[in-house]
Amino acid sequence: MSGKTLFNFIDKLFIKIRENMHITRFLIFNFIFFTFLYSDNPLVMLSPAGDAKNPGRTLDKGYERGVTLQIAEKLKEKIIDIYGARCLLTRSPGEVVSHLQNASFANRIFSNRVGFYLSIHVYHEEDIKPKLAIYRLVYNSMVDFASHNFSKFSFLTLYEAHFINIYKTKSFAEKMAEILTNEEHGQKFDFYGINGIPFKPLLGIIVPALAIEIGIKEEEQWRGLINPIVESMKFLLSF
């Protein structure tokens, strides 16, 4: 059985587990399973905004939660094919997952291994040309980017977790922006830059974590942004 076939089998297994398993036991299972089976390869975690209880923002014909899940599934497919990385979604249809559950999940899965966390958001845009922006968690640039001496035994609050990899996160954002701002992509969408703000979906996550927000007038326009986003993640090749 090839690596890709095995991964597809595991992915289907996880879907079945999600349908029949309490979320806490599911998180523990995922942690143990990935630790032993995929300990050598980098991991990308994709977090589509919204869930079964929170539909998110209203779009042209539906809600944010449906489109973000479609985007995450397509990104996952491309990331596996192009970069050979493992890729995991934080939720499936019908599931309710809070931001802090995602953070806890990410910190367990990424413990002692390299990886990248991407939160995905979509809103309705009046302009026909799509928009795209990158967000990273920053409360106070003077404090956040100051030198911090943490040991593996240090206790970190939710508001300090991002300090650990803040410079790597900044580097990943800049590498994504470098590709997203090229002339070819500029004809397809407007890039609104890198924004450092107190962004709740990234709270408490230790691994390098970014968010992308896509503005589209018509729901199917997201498909045209998949390749540029995947291309902007070339830094995965250096893991």
Image (spheres, helix red, strand yellow):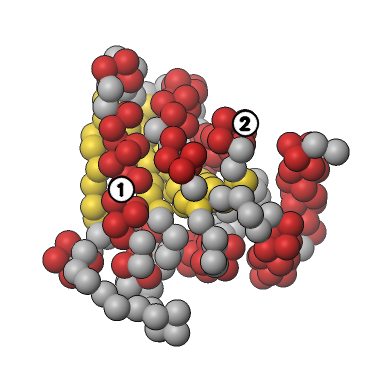
Q: Which residue is mark 1?
A: 171
Tell which circle, 1 or 2, labels the residue nearer the N-terminal end.
Answer: 2
Q: Who's the residue at 19% across and 69% down the image?
A: 146
Residue 95 image point, x, y percent: 63, 54
Q: Is residue 87 left or right of residue 26?
A: left
- The kind of residue tagged 2 is Asp
Pointer 1: residues within 10 angstroms few (<14), some, or many (20+)?
Answer: some
Q: Who's the residue at 77% across and 48% down the image?
A: 10
Q: Secondary structure at mark 1?
A: helix
Q: Are marks 1 and 2 in contact (CB under 8 Å)?
A: no
Q: Is residue 54 left or right of residue 129?
A: right
Could you say which is closer to the camera, residue 211 or residue 235? 235
- The kind of residue tagged 1 is Ser
Residue 30 image point, x, y percent: 69, 61
**Dividing the image into 4 quarters, which one contains the N terminus?**
top right
Q: Who's the residue at 27% across and 27% down the image?
A: 181
Q: Which residue is mark 2?
A: 81
Q: Quadrant of residue 35?
A: bottom right
Residue 97 image point, x, y percent: 56, 60
